[in-house]
Image (cartoon, grey):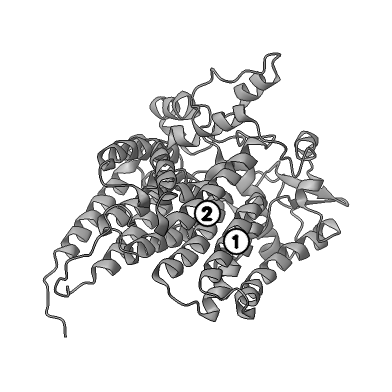
Amino acid sequence: MSPAGTGRRRPSPTRRWDDRTVAALFVASVLAISYGYFSPFGGWNANSRLSLVFAVLDDGALSIDAYHDAPLTRTGDKAFYEGRYYSDKAIGTAVLGLVAYAPISVGRAVSSPTRYAFTRHWITFFAVGLPVVAALSYLFLVLDRLGLDRRAALGIALLAGLATPLWPFATVLFGHALAAAALLAAFLMVMSRRQAQQPWTSGARVLWGSLLGFAVITEFPVTPVAATLALYYLFAAQERRELTRVRTWLLPAVGALPLLSLQLAYNALCFGSPFSLGYGHIADPDFRSMHAKGLLGVGLPSLEVLYYITLHPIRGLMFHSPVLLAGLAGLLLGVRQARWRAEAITCLVAVTIVLLINAGYGVWWGGFSFTARHAIPAVPFLLIGLTFLPRRPWPLIAVLAVVSLAQMLIAVVGGPRTSDTELIRRLGAPDGSVATLGSPLWSQIWPALLDDPSQFASNIGRRLGFVGFASLIPYGLVMAAWAGAYAWLRRAPRVTAP
């Protein structure tokens, strides 16, 4: 059974511009501009990673002693071991940060606020924004090649990038959106080959393993999701009777092991053992006690917390991005379709794992975050569910998409960071009730934007001298021009195929 809008396309003369290429470039450019235009400050989480990047390239060290308490890079997200401070984060985001910083690391990045702001913006865009752009552009190409209506494929890719928390968290130097991009790309590599019955090249298998390995060293909690995708890969290999071939197992390992070894080497150099993580040496005693419970702070999931991180305004992923509900419905429908059953089940399992881990985490609300940021790796798997929906609900999906897009724009413009003081106070109260709290998007971010133009997150418009909502004018003009250019290219004169 085919997904929504699937059908044989009518043969048409060759265009001067290839429609698929133009559409893919349109997706990539819209997302790249949207991610690069905004640069919210990431606070402790981002500074922990930036400090490691600066320490390695500016000081030739792994310890962040010179940065963890400096004015521009102060962070409480740090580990302390044998008299030195280190970043307590998984290293994947910082690894790409090193690649981004290397060409511009002439002099110290923290020598002035202006240089630091530019460096932070560039590293964030290169290390987080561009990988998300690449993964979602690949999503469009895969859906298009598998026969989904091109407009639907274009819409799904843009919705994933702009109507979900992938947008605000692609503009901060966290690991959630980056890990989500790596996992999505790995999933799509298997999906495209399984559905089109295309053979794997050796390079593709190595790359696939690298994506899984990179996701793990970017966000440790996605390890079970990576294992789920590995099972999906092996299922597809079994269908092609390739399960007993050495390259099926060996080549992905060749891609994954160097990255996993890099994390183990970092652990050994900083914390004395390959299997000793920064989270086991957290400097802050309160944070350390939280992560001492369960496995890296994750215990048994709570159904109440599951509600808070999905549907409740307090941090609900689907409250702030209701289009994800349509994706979930699509996944449930996809299980009933023979052609897509394996993909739908894989996505559902991945989503379930991410949500249950988040529901069992001691700091389930994500600290200073407007939504359940630890659940962001589930987002692309939910959006893939739109592929399996019939045509009829698309008007409803459009309404959900507009609401989602509007809320994500507010989060980006104001920055995704919000205070969790009241939430923590409520949790410490005798009844421990937080159910009456509303969305921080509407109780904190939006009122701040209305009251004080200085509360707008850093963006290109502000740097050009625009104030408040006027800082969005250049972004709106560029988006309008880009949409017009895409419409013109789609109407380009047809030529006869050679």
Q: Residue furthest top?
A: 430
User: On residue 260, which mark appears?
Assistant: none
User: On residue 346, which mark appears?
Assistant: 2
Disc 2 element: helix
Amino acid found under the numbered disc labelled 1 = Leu
Q: Are marks 1 and 2 in contact (CB under 8 Å)?
A: yes
Tell me: residue 117, above or below residue 446: below
Give me the residue at 24% from left, 67% from top.
Answer: 19
Give me the residue at 62% from left, 40% from top.
Answer: 356
Q: Position of residue 367 (x, y in %)?
A: 62, 35
Closer-to-camera residue (223/478): 223
Mark 1 → mark 2, Cα distance in angstroms? 9 Å
Pointer 1 residue: 231
Location of residue 338 by image quarter: bottom left
Q: Quadrant of the image for the C terminus?
A: bottom left
* Residue 38 can be seen in this image: no
